[in-house]
Image (spheres, grey):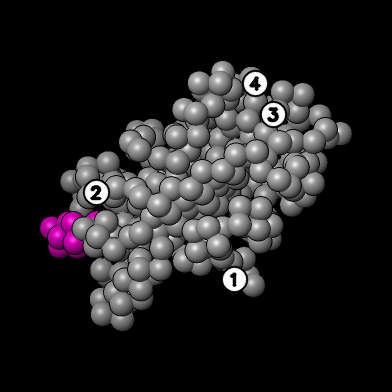
Amino acid sequence: MPLFAENFADSIEKTPQEEKIYKSFSLKPEEKLRSEVIRYLGYKREADVTPEIAVLLQKGMAEVCAVAEPRAIYRVFSTRESPHPENACHAPLSQQEGLVLMAVTLGVSVDRALDRAQIQDMTYALVLDSCATAAIESICDAVQGKVTEAYAHRKKHLTNRYSPGYGSLPLSTQPKLLSLLDAERKIGLSTTPSFLLTPSKSVTAMMWVSSLPQKDAHTSCEACNMHQVCHFRRQEGPIVHDA
């Protein structure tokens, strides 16, 4: 059974070795963010965006950047010895030296803006939702980049980022993951009885720490099993967001 599964918490010590909280991120309606919003809206190219949608897109990016209150936390936990030969991301367990749990949220103000838009203009609500999704992913990339940089100085490597709901990691792990992060108290992030995060524009994830780099650490859409049918796949590889 891969470690990226519902029983992941059984393989770690419950007292975190490290903790870092971020309460100030700068979100700007820049070109990188715009490119991701266009992709989430289902357009293949910038040229395909109609003038009407382009106006709403610019408005949506500005609103998300204005009202969002991005917060993030990550904690690092030491790992116990496990009988499993390797985990889902192909890093040998003998080389695993910790587990990084992270949570990121744009805050309740973005949810309120989305609720208002759904009442007033459903087209704009769709655009605004895509803007918020691109923004939260940008913040996640920024946090992951900070953790990766910190461990690179220690000659350590991180696996890809895995979130509940993907692969063998079910959504039902959300309460346990949030509890280990103390996320509700630290950054105001909780989960509903059906394991949906609230505020809705939030992400939780985990990454393993290893002394060896991850094998087959593909990040392009072409490496995903769903790339042929996914409407949100990137056409020219991933966009890397600056912190």
**Residue type, mark 4 in image:** Ser
Answer above or below: position of 213 versus 114: above
Q: Where is residue 79 in the image (x, y as percent from the top left)?
A: 74, 36
Say whether disc 4 or disc 2 marks the residue closer to the N-terminus: 2
Picture residue at 31% right of the left edge, 81% below the top = 119
Residue type at numbered disc 2: Lys
First of labels 1, 4 by sequence position? 1
Q: Which of marks 1 and 3 is nearer the N terminus?
A: 3
**How far is mark 4 from mark 2, CA to CA?**
35 Å
Residue position marked by numbered label 2 in the rendering? 28
Tags 3 and 4 touching, CB below 8 Å: yes
Report crowding for label 1: few under 14, some 14 to 19, many 20 or more residues within 10 A (C-alpha): few
Secondary structure beneath dot 4 equals: loop
Disc 1 or 2, which lies upstream in sequence?
Answer: 2
Q: Give the range drawn in magenta.
A: 51-61
Name the amino acid type tagged 1. Answer: Thr
96 left or right, relative to 220: right
Q: Quadrant of the C terminus?
A: top left
- Circles 1, 2 touching at the beta carbon (< 8 Å): no
